[in-house]
Amino acid sequence: TQLLEQSPQFLSIQEGENLTVYCNSSSVFSSLQWYRQEPGEGPVLLVTVVTGGEVKKLKRLTFQFGDARKDSSLHITAAQPGDTGLYLCAGANAGGTSYGKLTFGQGTILTVHP
Amino acid sequence: DAGVTQSPTHLIKTRGQQVTLRCSPKSGHDTVSWYQQALGQGPQFIFQYYEEEERQRGNFPDRFSGHQFPNYSSELNVNALLLGDSALYLCASSLGSGRNYGYTFGSGTRLTVV
């Protein structure tokens, strides 16, 4: 069974601070996807990283995929109250009969105070 | 451009009953996956449908079954409901496996079993 350990589980910070969320596994994934979910809504895709060592930037968000494709991180610079939400990492299985089933981490609940 | 549409949005059922949840994928997508998300947890993969066939299944009992129609829409059926089936059920669509380009999720159906 593949598992993704996401940390921290909760994060409460002030506006303007930086933060990093980590996603770790002992398994290799073909890609790592990050989603953000608001209460009462489904997850919304932020980014997909596919290549080991890949770094992607989305405005103030920086995503990194580990060289061995087993871990990933999300770094937010100068957090804003609009960044508040549940952040989920999800690994997509590689090859064989795995057709892109996503294994999700437990999620990180981020609260950014004005 | 409509995204993923799920119905109903909320549902209350009695233990032992049966339920059917419906999903219309994003225009242009041909693959539908279903996930169960318990409160405070990341989504858990139930199964994926492609070309009207179940292509991959997660660790869920046979009480959970599904169907995909020629227009790519899908249904999730749960028989003999248990209290533990109470959760947010998410439908996600993609073009192909979604491994490299991610998934589009619906807002979910909140199922409460009493």
Image: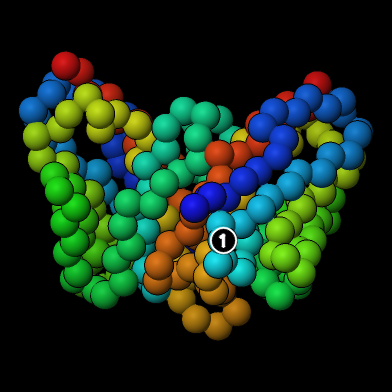
**Residue matched to label 1:** B27
Judged from the image, the secondary structure of the residue bearing numbered disc 1 is loop
Placement of the C terminus of chain B among the 4 image quadrants: top right
- Of residues B6 and A18, the one nearer the viewer is B6
Residue at the image position 20 percent from the left and 18 percent from the top:
A113
Q: Quadrant of residue A106?
A: top left
Q: State whether residue B44 appears in this view.
A: no
Residue at the image position 14 percent from the left and 21 percent from the top:
A14
- Of residues A70 and B18, the one nearer the viewer is B18
Give percent across and percent down for residue B112. 73, 26
- Of residues A70 and B1, the one nearer the viewer is B1
- Of residues A26 and A62, the one nearer the viewer is A62
Residue at the image position 50 percent from the left and 81 percent from the top:
A95
Picture colour scheme = rainbow
Q: Amino acid at mark 1?
A: Ser
Q: Is residue B15 left or right of residue B1?
A: right
Q: Quadrant of residue B81?
A: top right
Residue at the image position 39 percent from the left and 52 percent from the top:
A45
Q: Please, which residue is most extreme toward the bottom here? A: A96
Give percent across and percent down for residue A27. 40, 67
Q: State whether residue A34 appears in this view.
A: yes
